[in-house]
Image: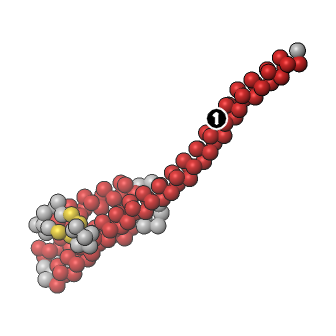
Amino acid sequence: MEAGACEQDAFEAIVMADSRFHGEGYQEGYSEGLQAGVIEGRQYGLQQGASIGLEIGSYLGFAVTWQRLLHKGSDGKHRKKIKVLESLIEMIQKFPREDPVYDKLQEDLVNIRGRFKQVCSLLHIPSDSRLGSEGAALTF
């Protein structure tokens, strides 16, 4: 009986080793995946933040430049254009640059893009303007 019990313990040890190794492998894989996900998520967030920052900064530079140009030749016909430019500038200044969990970030970004298109329409500039290939200038 002693030999049968020994064989049973050896068989049980083999079965339990498989289960134990499976559990350990799962935990190790889960930990590595979690760590890799955090790194990948951080890199993606940095890329998206830089892209949005470049877009918003370009809109702001565009709006401030046109605002100054229109103020120089200020007359009644430029009043609406200046008002819409000021509105765009205000929207950009209120945009949360330091709050990554701001719940209306996408909504505000869509509104800024819409206002930019409105400004382009008023200034008779094609609204499909995009950032230049170098990412530093608007091309029209």
- Among all residues in the image, which is located at the extreme top? 1
Q: Is residue 67 above or below residue 14?
A: below
Observer-nearest of 121 and 53 = 53
Q: Which residue is mark 1?
A: 22
Measured as percent of width and height from the top left, residue 112 is found at 30, 61
Q: Is residue 119 above or below residue 35?
A: below
Question: Which image quadrant: the N terminus?
Answer: top right
Q: What is the secondary structure assignment of the residue under circle 1?
A: helix
Observer-nearest of 36 and 14 = 14
Q: Residue at x 37, y 55 (%)?
A: 106
Q: Picture quarter containing residue 115?
A: bottom left
Measured as percent of width and height from the top left, residue 94 is found at 39, 67
Question: Which image quadrant: the C terminus?
Answer: bottom left
Q: Picture quarter containing residue 90?
A: bottom left
Give left or right: position of 43 versus 80: right
Q: Is residue 94 visible?
A: yes
Observer-nearest of 129 and 42 = 42
Q: Residue at x 67, y 31 (%)?
A: 18
- Among all residues in the image, which is located at the extreme front? 3
Measured as percent of width and height from the top left, residue 108 is found at 35, 58
What is the crowding at mark 1: few (fewer than 14 residues within 10 Å), some, or many (at least 20)? few
Give left or right: position of 100 versus 61: right
Q: Is residue 3 above or below residue 91?
A: above
- Give the residue type that dot 1 points to: His
Observer-nearest of 3 and 88 = 3
Q: Residue at x 16, y 61 (%)?
A: 127
Q: Is residue 86 visible?
A: no
Q: Is residue 63 above or below residue 36?
A: below
Q: Residue at x 43, y 63 (%)?
A: 46
